Image (tube, rainbow, N blue to C red):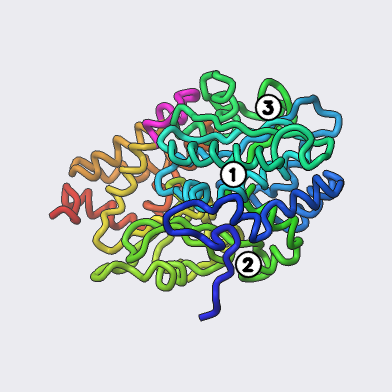
Amino acid sequence: MAEIPQVLFKNRKPDRVLSLEEYREMGGYEALRKCVGGGLPPKEVTRIVTEADLRGRGGAGFPAGKKWEAVPDSGDFPRYLVANADEMEPGTFKDRMLIHVNPHAIIEGMILTAYAFSGSKGFFFVRPSYESSAFILERELAFAKEAGFLGKNILGSDFSFDIVVHRSGGRYICGEASALLNAIMGKRPNPVKPPPYPTVRGLWDKPTVVNNVETLANVPYILRNGPEWFKGLAVGANGAGTKIFAVSGRVVSPGAVELPMGTRLSEIIDVHCGGMLPGSEFKACLPGGASTRFLAKEHYDVRMDFDGLRAVGNRLGTGAIMVFDHKTCLVGATLNMMEFFARESCGWCTPCREGLPYMRDLLRRIESGEGRAEYIPLLKTLCGEVWNAYCALAPGAAEPVVSLLQFFEEEVREHIARKGCPFHA
């Protein structure tokens, strides 16, 4: 088998982070010297990243360069950049792994991103249970500042930029960009529906860019090696770069693996995760975290990229693959996720505040043996109604339910017929 190219996980250490010196030995901060130290125009930085087709790795898949371009030239100052490391969705842990493997790629990526739209201050937004990540970031930020890569007049240029670590309150809604910004400002973390977008009016009413940690970590490598190199890393013509897949569940070797964007699901499980556990057969998986739809057996060979998953009515999300085997009750698994989403609703709008607990309670009844046939069409109706919610939390929360009823309705009906869970018999 051909060697898999490693970019973000290159020279990954089994028991410690990559040091500043080790990162520099492999070309780290050369992109910063080329762009900031060498006087490359900020708009050229944006153009290169846009041409590379770097799309957000945090769930939405929005082109990173296009987001930076949305900061108006005439916009106010100061301008802010936020690295979203909240990662509160069940099944997701790739950003934590990246911080623990290669923190300076993220730091350099933040500096270059801020340079592209004239940002002056950055925030690492970290969930409270990621205290080890916060410690690593604060330590490595101090090293980067000591080396002259952060602070006033970076590398002798007119560009100044600094980064602080912000420990969040630890709620799932804080991962939504506008709610995240409210949390940083000390406000209740309710989402804010645009317009205006954060790139026009974000933190303290100033232009603000919010990018995922993995997205930012790719920026230095693109600027160092070029757009064609980055696009050439992917499998197929429609993808670009590599992707960190966080695999959990009924596989031999769960964990975070960096693979070419577009690698098939079957290869990820069978080759890079050692296959299913002995005695287990693949039944389904969630391809991008708890807010994506189940992939059934017929999708086992799907390409894991934005277009491949869209073609089968799904989405890549965060690339957090949660694998379920034939002995797993998917009604129970979906209920478990719905318990989380119902609890994490901020309560701002009725479809989310009332709809998610209603769906959870119907699933509870079905799982406990109190289900009725009329609950199935009622669940389908509720899945449609939550799209009227104020933000994307409720529609995302409904995705496992939608696909449960699409691919595994017979399993739901068996619960109702048997008046209990057949997997617990």
> Is label 3 in contact with label 2 (beta carbons under 8 Å)?
no
**Whether residue 304 can be seen here:** no
Kindly state the secondary structure of the residue where label 3 is placed.
loop
Judge left or right: residue 18 versus residue 250.
Answer: right
Residue 212 badge: 1
Neighbour tally class for label 1: few under 14, some 14-19, many 20 plus, Cα within 10 Å: many
Tell me the quadrant of the picture where the C terminus can be found: bottom left
In this rendering, the answer to whether 336 lies above or below 78 is below
> Could you give the CA–CA distance between mark 3 and mark 2, rounded to whole angstroms?
33 Å
Disc 1 residue type (three-letter) = Asn
What secondary structure is marked by label 2?
A: loop
Whether residue 93 is situated above or below residue 153 in the rendered picture = below
x and y, in percent, of residue 367 in the image: 23, 45
Give the x, y percent position of residue 41.
Answer: 86, 46
Asked if one can make out residue 328 in the rendered structure from this viewpoint, the answer is yes
200 lies above or below 57: above
Give yes or no for residue 329 being in the magenta stretch: no
| Residue span colored magenta | 341-354
Q: Which residue is drawn at 55% across and 18% down?
A: 187
Distance between mark 2 and mark 1 Cα atoms:
20 Å
What numbered label is drawn on residue 234?
2
Residue neighbourhood size for the residue with mark 2, other residues' Cα within 10 Å, grouped as few (<14), some (14–19), many (≥20): many
Q: Nearer the viewer, residue 153 or 381?
A: 153
User: Badge 3: how crowded within 10 Å, few (<14), some, or many (20+)?
Assistant: many
- The residue at 60%/27% (across/down) is 181
Disc number at residue 202? 3
Q: Name the outermost residue toward the bottom.
A: 1
> Distance from label 3 to label 1 (Cα)?
16 Å
Identify the secondary structure beneath mark 1.
strand
Res. 237 image quadrant: bottom right
Sequence-wise first label, 3 or 1: 3
